[in-house]
Image: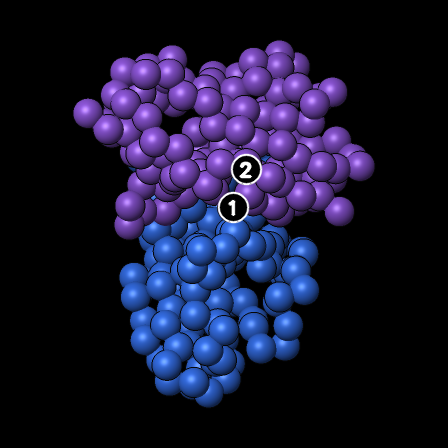
Chain colours: A blue, B purple
Amino acid sequence: EPEVTQTPSHQVTQMGQEVILRCVPISNHLYFYWYRQILGQKVEFLVSFYNNEISEKSEIFDDQFSVERPDGSNFTLKIRSTKLEDSAMYFCASSTTGSTGGYTFGSGTRLTVV
Amino acid sequence: AQSVTQLDSQVPVFEEAPVELRCNYSSSVSVYLFWYVQYPNQGLQLLLKYLSGSTLVKGINGFEAEFNKSQTSFHLRKPSVHISDTAEYFCAVSPGGSQGNLIFGKGTKLSVKP
């Protein structure tokens, strides 16, 4: 069964550093998403990406964050100047048809900012 | 704005017993409804979804859910659980018209005991 692959599974970074979280969505999917889950809290929507541009973003997704699809297969989330409160599990997801199709989620990257 | 409430943070149950995980939502627009399951150290897997039509939807692993518009609920049920059903279960809604941004509940940890 096709999978969404996320790397790394766990990343530790120092406060103020930049991190790039990587995702390989399912090849024929057209919609891409990033979500995050702070420990003990809800899974929260960050951003959706379609047709090579951001289609929607939440209030969380401020200038500190950016997304890119650099080569047609990878989908990355960059966090500039990380803060302690950025520590969370970050999930990538992809979908063929947006909400009606449901998503396929990756296993997540646990980001720890120290 | 939409919101999702999962009333029970933890549900312990014995093997082969029935279980119901409760989910209520609030929305001023029509929504799509989903249940996801997260096994330890894995991503979110779609259990079932309600888009329209029959209010009783069946999903994988013997789970089913019933959409009740008047009560704004979408409770998840299974008539007989197995040890392997131990996981965290998330209810989510997607506002109609969006490209699929999911709004999640806080999750319910189902613990099946022998």
Do we see residue A76 in this rendering? no
Q: Earlier in the sequence, mark 2 or mark 1?
A: 2
Q: Position of residue B2 (x, y in %)?
A: 71, 43
Above/below status of A93 relative to B23 = below
Q: Residues within 10 Å of mark 2 (few under 14, many from 20)?
A: many
Where, by quadrant of the figure, is residue B63 drawn?
top left
Label 2 resides on the chain identified as B
Q: Which residue is mark 1?
A: B106
Q: Position of residue A63 (x, y in %)?
A: 63, 77
User: Where the N terminus of chain A falls, by quadrant?
Assistant: top left
SS at mark 1 in the image: loop
Going by the numbered disc 2, the residue's amino acid type is Gln
Total tally of numbered discs in the picture: 2
> Viewed as shown, does residue B40 lie left or right of A57?
left
Residues at marks 2 and 1, CA–CA distance in whole angstroms: 6 Å
* Callout 2–callout 1 Cβ contact below 8 Å: yes
Q: Position of residue A95 (x, y in %)?
A: 51, 42
**For this rendering, which residue is in front, B33 or A63?**
B33
SS at mark 2 in the image: loop
**For this rendering, which residue is in front, B82 or A45?**
B82
Above/below status of B68 relative to B100 = above
